[in-house]
Amino acid sequence: MRRFITSTVFMVFAAAPAWAEDTPVCMPAVELEATLKDWYGETPVTAAQYNQVLWASERNDTWTLVQYRSYDDARVACTLASGEDRIPASVDQAILALPAETAERRIAQISEDF
């Protein structure tokens, strides 16, 4: 059942245009990382900066900015942003690609939840 829910959440996320969702998608880091690798062919392209890592796939021309948190002794990952084409070169560039209020709202939502 858990895999079904995870798959459903990501299918909805993947079908939405970039920046469309108002709420970050959060799940155990292992599951999110497996999804990024298996479905999108993405790998980490930056070292952790502000507990955030930029994942990207040059082959698929996709990228995802992931925020990592610890929660009840578990590592949780949340998507802050994603896109196609024009892969940002750094976490800072990915954050700058977001409208300022969107980036602030998503980071605040994650902070409130954890």
Image (spheres, rainbow, N blue to C red):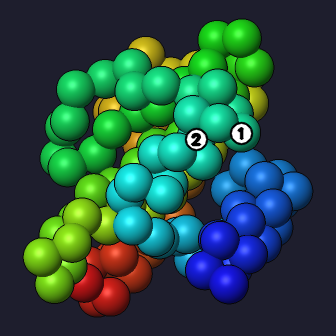
Task: State the image coordinates of residue 54 (x, y, percent, origin top left).
Answer: 41, 33
The answer to which image quadrant residue 41 occupies is: top right
Left or right: 1 in relation to 108: right
Taking the view exactly as shown, the residue that stands out farthest to the front is: 1
Residue that carries the numbered disc 2 in the rendered image: 36
Q: Residue at x 47, y 71 (%)?
A: 26
* Nearest the eye: 4 or 60: 4
Left or right, 63 with reference to 50: right
Write the residue at 65% across / 71% down.
Answer: 3
Under tag 2, what secondary structure?
helix
Mark 1 highlights which residue?
A: 39
44 shown above or below 22: above
Residue 82 position in % (x across, y down): 61, 44
Q: Indicate whether 47 appears above or below 52.
A: above
x%, y% of residue 24? Answer: 53, 70
Which corner quadrant holds the C terminus? bottom left
**Residue contact between numbered discs 2 and 1, judged by CB atoms under 8 Å:** yes
In the picture, measured across the screen, residue 38 lies left or right of residue 52, that is right
- Under mark 2, the amino acid is Leu
